[in-house]
Image (tube, rainbow, N blue to C red):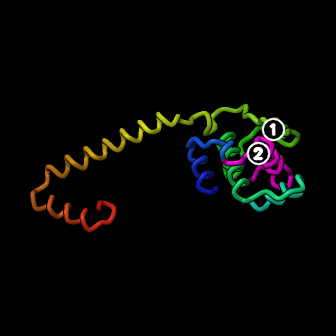
Amino acid sequence: MSHLSEAVKQGLPVDKAKTGLSEEIEAAVARAIASDAVSSDVLRLAPIKGQYDAKEGTEIEWGILRLAVSFLMLRFGVQENKLQWSDEERRKALHSTSDLQPSGEGTIADEEETKDEKLSRLEGEARGSLKRMLSSTSRQSPQAREDIKKKMKKNSLFR
């Protein structure tokens, strides 16, 4: 699950339904984060888990907790390890059962690229890197090109 939470933090598309994270669990995690004991601090997960377990009466798995916190970080944004939700959003989280939505601007979710946009951007960057590498190789002497080929053969990445 930690790889999925990292993907969410990077803004990559992750299907919540397939991860086992329900809106109710995410809302309960938001309640735990909004509590006075945690006060929106998402740096350490143990206090959030303690609040969740105490308030909900059940234990949450670390992976699901990490994933829920990542989705909340993406939705509301984070600054100095604290969720950047308004006082109204925090109050709503304390009393809500699901369907938290940010009201502010400038969160990571507002700037999120679609999968196709990200793929085309990355392909363009890779093409540019390849062109630069090929053009610099073509300007080199034949001996320098041979040396590069030998290095590439020795490196297991290029086999």
Residue appearing at x 47%, y 34% in the figure = 116
**Residue at 57% from the left image edge and 41% from the top image edge:** 13
Q: How far is mark 2 from mark 1, CA to CA?
A: 7 Å
Q: Quadrant of residue 128?
A: top left
Quarter of the image for residue 53 reads bottom right
Residue 145 visible in the current orientation: yes
- Where's residue 88, x and y in %? 82, 35
Which quadrant is the N terminus positioned in?
Answer: bottom right
Would residue 159 appear left or right of 31 to someone viewing this image? left
- Asked if the residues shown at circle 2 and circle 1 are in contact, with their CB atoms under 8 angstroms apart, the answer is yes
User: Residue at 19% across / 46% down in the picture?
Assistant: 135
Marked residue nearer the N-terminal end (2 or 1): 2
Kind of residue at badge 1: Ser
Dot 2: what SS?
helix
* Quadrant where the C terminus is found in the figure: bottom left
Q: Residue furthest bottom?
A: 154
Q: In the rendered structure, which segment of residues is drawn in magenta?
A: 19-44
- What residue sits right under mark 2 in the picture? 26
Asked if the magenta segment contains residue 82, the reply would be: no
What residue would you read off at disc 1? 98
